[in-house]
Image: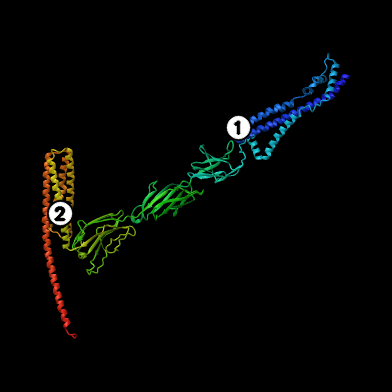
Amino acid sequence: MNGVDVTAGFRQSVLLPLRAAGRTLRRRIVLEGACRCVAVLVAAAFVQFALDKLLVLGAGPRAALLLALLALMARNLWRYVIRPFALRIDAEDVARILERRHPPLKDILISAVSFATRPAPADSSLAMRSNVIRDCQQRVRAIPFGPNIRRDRHRKFLATGLVAISVAGIAAIWQPDTFATYLARNFALQDVAWPSGTELWIQGFANGKLRWPVGDPLTLVVTASGRIPRGLRAEFEASSGAGLTRDMALRGREQFVVDYGPLQQSMKVRFLIWKLGVDERTEWHDIEAIERPSIAGARVQITPPPYSRQEPYTLAAGQTGADILRSSAVRIEATTNKPVVEASLRSADRVVAPADLLSATQIVSAFEPSHSGTFYFALRDADGLDDLRPVTYSLRLLSDPAPRVRLTLPGAGEMLVAAAVLPLVVDCEDNLGIRSIDLMIRPSRLKDSGDTRPDDSMTEPLPGLVAGQTNYTQERSWPLLPLTLQPGDELSMWVRAADDQPGAALSTATAPSGTEPAAPPSVGQSQVYTFRIVTPQELLAELSRRENEWRREFEGVIQAQERLNTRIMDIHDQAAAATSEALSTRFAQEARAQRQIANRIGVISRQFEQLLAERQINQLEDATIRRRLDRGVIRPLAGIAASDIPQISEVMDRLRERFDPAEAESLETAQKRLLARMYEVLANMLKWEGYEEAVALLRDIIRLQGDLNRDTRQQMQKEIESLLGESATTQPEGR
């Protein structure tokens, strides 16, 4: 009975408090485990947040971190929450804890609890058990069961959990966008961007898209607001997959600029904001490459002016330049690479002609160029883009060149007699056709001649012209006698030709006397020849003077030939002692000297031909004069220059290559014959000069006789006037 009472009292005073302490202990262990799990969760989440925020992890790394976080949390929950919660803490467990904390109890508490909770064995002593229980009751009365649990440790865990929950709550309240982004990225594994304190505005983009012309330099300008980044980069990704990243230059305090260069294809771009860790990336923005309007092909048709009688023609494909006649009509039909809404034909930034839109891609413009230059179509499409590199058409206007006219007067000199007959040779050519060709004559009268006729130019159409022919040649003899010229007058003559272009009319207006007449731009004009009209005696005196001059020139040529012959003989005499190189050099020098003599003789021959031609033109030659000059001087000189001297020069050339005594002897003989012929010609010149002097003397006698008769008549006239004058003065006034 006493044992029962003892056990019941022990249970009431010790066992029930121990069991209550065990339940409290388990709850605290579970709570501490939960606080531990919350702290670990918050710490792991912070690490996850830091890694993702700094490195901007992709979906794969974020999923791996999430799995690691979940595994860590599962392990901690199992170890610190689930397992402690499933653990049963009975009175014996609490007794062991109290005995470790209160060593004086030794094993009495655990023994009393064991005796009170377990049935007693058959051989056990009930008295001992009762004594132990009573002793234990006495000892544990002063020991509180609740305070024996470590409250400091419990408070530390609670504080850790509260701090972790507070940190998470504060982060969610302070940065809700960042907190929500963290949850979306790392728990929902969504690909959303982290909230940024930097706002970027990209110039030119609308709804994240930019349309840019192909080939134009692309420059991106980004304006930053909020937190201005320390650096910005542009990351390009072409439609082909090629990528490119370029740093952007800071302009001012908040603008960033990057020059991409000419755009070749569509691409997308995003911007990387520099920060610690990995750059912050914006969303992709599309750049669509579009073509500017341009000419894909053109057909250029040229219609020459009607007077040219040319058919319209079309330039070859790809030809963008042409030389066209002035007043030609031009029609350009062009095809564009894309539809256009505006088009005009321009030159040097001014509108030349409108362009009609036959369709969205077909334009045509017809115009008559007023100037040479470069022409192009100004195009604009529906996007407002202009053609910045237009196809140009270079048109050079050519005025129909005036006919080319050449007038020659074979044998005519600067002096003519009034009865001369001029040989005219007229050559005219025009690319499109000659309309008219006229001989222009302008006599200039003597001031003291008393002739009141004007000095206006006279026009004489040349015969034989067929309108429209492109070549004209005329040879004729033109007498001066109908002009009734007098010695001392001047005569100017030239030829003018006009073609069929508008405004190409021959003008008979003359320039002031003494000046060269000017022709209109569309009229071709030959050289103007001016002659002085002299008496036959003056012309013959001039011809004699020139003949004497050229006769003296020929005497100098003979002297040069004599010296040349002497040098050739010296070479022959010294040939035995001279080297082949020395002989070759001397024969080369003499060959050149011999050819120079031939040239001088040719000039003299042509001068005598001119003298004979002037006599013929001025009707001052007869059969005797022609025979003496032609057979005695001109022909021999021509033969010497064209045949004799070249043969001698060839012999010298052979001797220069190889000296041959026999050939050297023949050279000396040929030079002697040449010198003899030259003396024969000189004798004819002197003979003719003597004949001319005799004729001139006879003319002087006749002129002096005429002058004497004229002087006699003038003296008689003066005597008669003197006699008549005296009679008139002595007569009375009444008569």
Judged from this view, the residue extending furthest toward the top is 123
Indicate which disc residue 348 carries: none
Indicate which disc residue 552 carries: 2
The one of 304 and 196 positioned closer to us in this rendering: 196
Q: Quarter-wise, where is residue 157 in the image? A: top right
The one of 446 and 560 positioned closer to us in this rendering: 560
Q: In the image, what residue type sits under mark 2?
A: Arg
Q: How is the image coloured?
A: rainbow
Q: In the image, what residue type sits under mark 1?
A: Pro
Q: Looking at the rendering, in which quadrant would you find the N terminus?
A: top right
Tell me where residue 276 appears, x and y as whole percent.
Answer: 59, 37
Judged from this view, the residue extending furthest toward the right is 1
Q: Does residue 631 appear left or right of residue 26 in this picture? A: left
Judged from this view, the residue extending furthest toward the bottom is 734
Q: How many marks?
A: 2
The one of 278 and 391 positioned closer to us in this rendering: 278
User: Considering only vertical position in the picture, is 699 above or below 723?
Assistant: above
Question: Which residue in the structure is indicated by mark 1?
Answer: 61
Q: Quarter-wise, where is residue 660 in the image? A: top left
User: Considering only vertical position in the picture, is 605 above or below 32?
Assistant: below
Tell me where residue 223 appears, x and y as whole percent.
Answer: 57, 45
SS under mark 1: helix
SS under mark 2: helix
Q: Quarter-wise, where is residue 150 in the image? A: top right
The one of 429 and 202 positioned closer to us in this rendering: 202
Mark 2, other Cα within 10 Å: few <14 / some 14–19 / many ≥20 = few
Tell me where residue 360 appears, x and y as whole percent.
Answer: 48, 49
Is residue 639 among the parts visible in the rendering? no
